[in-house]
Image (tube, rainbow, N blue to C red):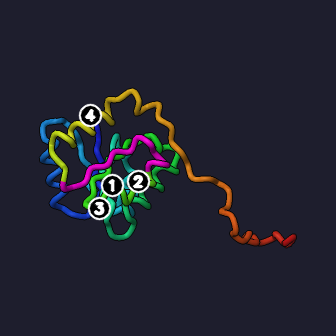
Amino acid sequence: MKTIMIIENNETYHNTYKAMLKGHNYKFVQTYDGYEAMEKMDETTPDLIILDMLMDMITGDTFFMYLRNIPEYTSIPVIIISSASERRYRHLRIADPGLSFIEKRFLTREKLVGEIYKKLHSTENTSRDIFKLPEAAAPDTKRVCMAGDFNN
């Protein structure tokens, strides 16, 4: 049985997604913001994540970038379902070119089931390239002096 983590601050959408996926034999982990999702990721690693963008505490895009920069989580497929326009978050495809995005107003059972099936059963999913944030300091940033580093 595959596990889907739903990260959504609205209970109604949790119920909607679960109803749309009824009969597909998925286990659900429900979280209501990115912070709670991070905590639950320590307990269980989902096979797929349904992610809202507009949440309190840690927003969806912040959580997504966190996820893509933790080696053990980089291969977890993500489907973003948001009331915000995909155009607003297209920069996230830099970190994951295979990212799926569905605007809530266009969400249908068939579209959700189809995207989940593609993500969980595609051979492309296991070999996709994940781009990480650069490890170097950003240009024009000052070097931080650490305790014991008196050569500055």
Q: Residues within 10 Å of mark 2 (few under 14, many from 20)?
A: few
Q: Residues within 10 Å of mark 4 (few under 14, many from 20)?
A: few
Q: Position of residue 54 (x, y in %)?
A: 31, 65
Asked if disc 1 and disc 4 are in contact, CB closer than 8 Å, the reply is: no
Number of the label disc, if any, that sits on residue 84: 3
Labels 3, 4: front one? 3
- Amino acid type of the residue that numbered disc 4 sits on in the rendered structure: Tyr
Q: Which residue is mark 4?
A: 117
Q: Is residue 100 above or below residue 35?
A: above
Seen from the viewer's position, the closer of residues 87 and 15 is 87
Q: Which residue is mark 2?
A: 90
Q: Which residue is mark 1?
A: 86
- Amino acid type of the residue that numbered disc 3 sits on in the rendered structure: Ala
Q: Say which residue appears at 76% left-offset and 72% top-offset.
A: 145
Seen from the viewer's position, the closer of residues 129 and 147 is 129
Q: Say which residue appears at 52% left-offset and 51% top-offset.
A: 69
- Whether residue 116 appears in this view of the structure is yes
Q: Position of residue 22 (x, y in %)?
A: 13, 41
Q: Say which residue appears at 25% left-offset and 60% top-offset.
A: 83
Span colored in magenta = 93-105
Seen from the viewer's position, the closer of residues 120 and 105 is 105
Q: Earlier in the sequence, mark 2 or mark 3?
A: 3
Q: Is residue 105 left or right of residue 119?
A: left
Q: Secondary structure at mark 2?
A: helix
Q: Is residue 127 above or below residue 41?
A: above
Q: Is residue 100 above or below residue 25?
A: below
Quick check: is 97 in the magenta stretch? yes
Q: Secondary structure at mark 3?
A: loop
Q: Residues within 10 Å of mark 1 (few under 14, many from 20)?
A: some
Q: Secondary structure at mark 4?
A: helix
Q: Residues within 10 Å of mark 3 (few under 14, many from 20)?
A: some
- Amino acid type of the residue that numbered disc 1 sits on in the rendered structure: Glu
